[in-house]
Image (tube, rainbow, N blue to C red):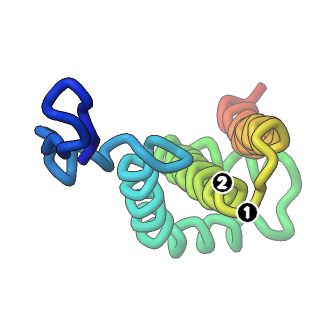
Amino acid sequence: MSSNPQAGGNKPVPSMRTPLGKVRKLGPARSGTSDFWQQRISGVAMTLMILPAIIIIMMLLGRNQAGAAQILGSPLIALTMILFIIASAIHMKIGMQVVIEDYVQNEKLKLVTIMANNFFSIAVALAPIFAIIKLSSGV
């Protein structure tokens, strides 16, 4: 409640906003719910794809480039690995962003580290995706 001097002195004026309306879009991230769900969905996706990814990686162990290209030449195998990498990168990015938002106090440093986290996550995802596409296409 706030006071309104024009409404009879220091008499409190009730707020028309609901408790949910008062807290909506508050917090350091201003996107907590979407980040929460993205992290949960990426975690479930990684859980579902970990066994196929491990099997594919075990199939690739000890192979030369031609053997790896033959295995990754299958669209299903290449797509499985790419989706696993994307889910892992998203999960990593959101997890690190939560840590940064919670523990970095300086706003400028927070902005710089979040930007670095975004660029690092993209680089970590793009490097193996590029390698998989290159190997699977035979280039």
Type of amino acid at the residue the image marks with label 1: Tyr
Image coordinates for residue 111, horizontal then vertical, percent: 75, 37
| Image disc number at residue 69 | none
Vertical comparison of 133 with 99: above or below: above
Image coordinates for residue 40, horizontal then vertical, percent: 41, 63
Residue at position x 57%, y 46% in the image: 86
Residue at position x 57%, y 57% in the image: 91
Type of amino acid at the residue the image marks with label 2: Glu
Query: Dot 2: what SS?
Result: helix
Q: Quadrant of residue 21?
A: top left
| Image disc number at residue 101 | 2
32 or 137: nearer the viewer: 32
Vertical comparison of 62 with 90: above or below: below
Q: In the displayed structure, does residue 116 sit left or right of residue 90?
A: right
Query: Can I make out residue 77 in this image?
Result: no
Q: CA distance from mark 1 to mark 2?
A: 6 Å
Q: In the displayed structure, does residue 12 sit left or right of residue 42?
A: left
Residue at position x 50%, y 65% in the image: 46
21 or 126: nearer the viewer: 21
Quarter the C terminus occupies: top right
2 or 9: nearer the viewer: 9
Q: Are marks 1 and 2 in contact (CB under 8 Å)?
A: yes
Residue projecting furthest to the front: 9
Residue at position x 43%, y 51% in the image: 32
Which residue in the structure is indicated by mark 1?
A: 103
